[in-house]
Image (tube, rainbow, N blue to C red):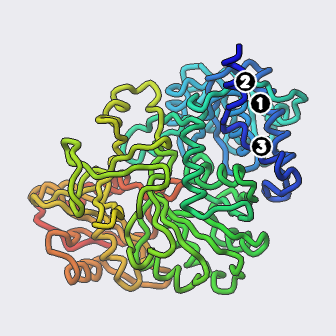
Amino acid sequence: MTSALVDQARQQSLGDLPRRTARRVPDKLAIVDGDTRLTFAELDALVDRTAAAMHDAGLVKGDRLALLCHNCWQFVVLNFAAARAGVVLVPVNFMLGGDEIAYILDHSGATAFVAEDALLPVAEQAVAASGGGVRQRLVVRLHGGAVADGWRDLQDWLDHDGADPGVPVADDDPVRMMFTSGTESRPKGALLTSRSLLWQYVSCVVDGSMGADDVELHTLPLYHCAQLDCFLGVDVYLGATSVILPGPDPAAILRAIEEHRVTKFFAPPTVWIGLLRAPGFDEADLSSLAKGYYGASPMPVAILEEIQERLPDVDLWNFYGQTEMAPLATILGPGEQLTHAGSAGRAALNVETRIVDDLDQQVPAGTVGEIVHRSPHATLGYYHDHANTAEAFRGGWFHSGDLGYVDEDGRLYVVDRKKDMIKTGGENVASREVEEAIYQLEGVAEVAVFGISHPRWVEAVAAVVVPKPGATLTSEQVIEHSRSVLAGYKTPKYVVVADALPKNPSGKILKRRLRDDHAGLAGPDDTGGPGTDG
């Protein structure tokens, strides 16, 4: 009995954070979402009631609750309420189809499913295609839609009159199952604990210069752990204010920064690029913005230079990591953005990072190998996937699947994903290096480089290029420019000029789709191509 009481007194769970912050700053503004304003005291009360409702509805510690919803204050409440009730939250990508969501429901073993009203058609398809494990279905009525048969209104949980159910949650009990983005393969369910998340929060706060006075704008999907945990979770932990938008619309971002005097903003490079190209950018009052963060993919050097020229008072940080690291692994700070452009920085406060060869032996500085980490940030492993867990953690290090090297001062440079390295004619070509070269060409807004099958070279370098608004580009121009700055074998043999690149909602370019869509560029008798427009 004494041991249980000691454990209770020492508990440090994700679900504890709103209560602790509410006791420090009860009347401070926690959440802004449209017309909804929640103080930290109000947020904590909602978390209490919702956790009690889960408990009274029969959800027990370790049960999984899937959540399919755009960004909203209800998402925040469910995130902390599930953790307070000992329930494992399973955020679901709202861009997925019914069968893909059914896979997540079945693989996670979800017994409860909360879905936004606008997403009910695909949610019902998913439930119908799943194995029938979902016993409770609730609707987040963001658009005033009717509650369909077989579903309950989430408002019933939010209005519940119960109190904190007092479920003991140890720091290494799972509180979240984050499915990997699946840009290369079937998504895997990475289990994160309070230990994973809170040690990561400490790394973010210290290395990312975050504080209670921040006013942060959240526009990237909260189902992605970068927005949910590097930023929103940290804000609740510290007592900072979170302004929530349903998505990363550039015009809405500019308005929100002005209206709410936003000081802090995170986005992947694709969203930063869209913001810079927005028609109202130069007229917007962005003087409150002091901290900018990027991640999910490397920032082109040309875009870094443009951000620092057009937003000279904004300090920038590069956050590099992956879902399995909750997700932060390394950070490049404001003083090194241009002096060490392209670097992912050094290991975060609570992370140890090194580069290894195929035998898992550490390699010297300057040598490319796989990036591996040791950290309390790391996932417990993949749910019901012992083989992939064992492979990822071989030798006692988490293997990221990314290739990179460190310089003599310990700064990390990410070369490519292992699966994105192009092997053409016996030579290795890093897609990122080719992308950086193409970005130097005037008129290029975005580019993605990837490998396609080739009858002579085994793989050939291909690129899809998106011009800036009003610019005209041809494939021949891109190839000619590439030849002028790259070795011949690195120069794209095929270039497609397109209107847009396929991306997931977190801003990652879907290279698997590009490889599939453009697999036929090289014909059976092809020896290299002139490029194509289309």
- Seen in the image, is 268 located left or right of residue 524? right
- Name the image quarter holding the C terminus: bottom left
Vertical comparison of 279 with 186: above or below? below
Q: Does label 3 or label 1 sit earlier along the sequence?
A: 3
Task: Tell me the CA gap for discs 3 and 2.
Answer: 16 Å
Which tag is nearer the camera, tag 1 or tag 2?
2
Direction top: furthest residue: 1
Q: Amino acid at mark 3?
A: Arg
Q: Position of residue 162 (x, y in %)?
A: 87, 27
Q: Which residue is mark 3?
A: 20
Residue in view at x 61 percent, y 38 percent: 122
Marks 1/2 in contact by CB < 8 Å: the verdict is yes
Q: Amino acid at mark 1?
A: Ala
Q: Which residue is mark 2?
A: 167
Q: Secondary structure at mark 2?
A: loop
Vertical comparison of 126 with 117: above or below? above
Q: Amino acid at mark 2?
A: Val
Q: Does label 1 or label 2 sit earlier along the sequence?
A: 1
Which tag is nearer the camera, tag 3 or tag 1?
3
Q: Which residue is mark 1?
A: 51
| Crowd around label 2: few <14 · some 14–19 · many ≥20 (10 Å) | some
Q: Position of residue 133 (x, y in %)?
A: 60, 19
